[in-house]
Image (cartoon, grey):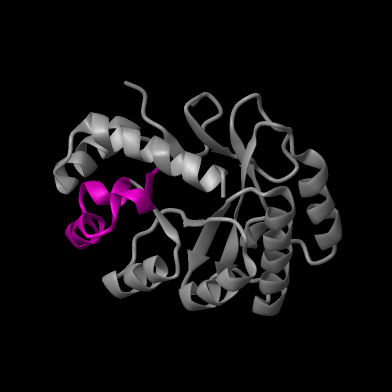
Amino acid sequence: MEFFDFHHHKIDVINGIYNLNISEVPPDISYSIGIHPHDIDLYTIEKQLNWMRDTMSENCFAIGECGLDSLVPVDQKIQEKVFLEQIRISNEVKKPMIIHCVRKFYEVISFKKKAEQAMIIHGFNKKKQIADDLLAHNFYLSFGKAVLYNLSLQDILKNTPTNRIFLETDNEDFNIEELYLKVSELKGISLERLNEQIVENLHTIKNG
């Protein structure tokens, strides 16, 4: 059985979405393209956005990762401007968005009303209240390695509807199958059914 890796940084992983690095040439596999908050260059923002638009090929599945991050040394207003432009691109090309967020969840939620496509918070590892608020605003949550050992995150995942989740390795070095096994155990469903549901979720976000 193959397991879909929703967000990864390994060019040799075929069944998943590869996170394209800025200025990188797109690979012949499914990928996402975006301007991460820590990659924003104040002097070449328009050039970066044009790179996004010009670089998309038929293998581009999503816009991202992009979003807001309170820890990077880029002014928040600039981050918000670049995030909004990427939401507009997502709307134009009708592709879902993979969201990076650090301590700015309610600001990200405020941008949701401007988005016409699905928004997925990648690497979710926060408190239950944040999860509940994101789900209430129709976000999807993508979970990573922390689920294997973080008990509070396990409880959050148990209570997250299966049709709102994705699973990912991000930049961690472990086998995605471990995560699928753990989640199937937590959700009390078979590995096959979990796998089917993730595929269904992919079709849902891809088709708007």
Residue 48 drawn above or below residue 200: below
The count of marks equals 0
User: In the image shown, does 31 or 21 lie closer to the viewer?
Assistant: 31
| 143 relative to 154 in the view: left or right | right
| 11 relative to 141 in the view: left or right | right
Magenta-colored segment: predominant secondary structure: helix
Residue 185: x %, y % from top left: 15, 41
Q: Residue at x 43, y 36 (%)?
A: 5
Residue 28: x %, y % from top left: 65, 24
Q: Residue at x 42, y 44 (%)?
A: 201
| Residue 172 at least partly seen | no
For residue 72, what is the image quadrant?
bottom right
Query: Which quadrant of the rendered structure holds the N terminus?
Result: top left
| Residue 43 at least partly seen | yes
Residue 169 drawn above or below residue 83: above
Residue 167: x %, y % from top left: 37, 43
| 45 relative to 122 in the view: left or right | right
Q: Residue at x 79, y 54 (%)?
A: 48
Residue 42 drawn above or below residue 203: below
Residue 25: x %, y % from top left: 74, 33
- State the extent of the magenta-drawn residues as a range: 145-168
Q: Residue at x 67, y 65 (%)?
A: 83
Question: Is residue 154 found inside the magenta-colored segment of the image?
Answer: yes
Question: Is residue 186 found inside the magenta-colored segment of the image?
Answer: no
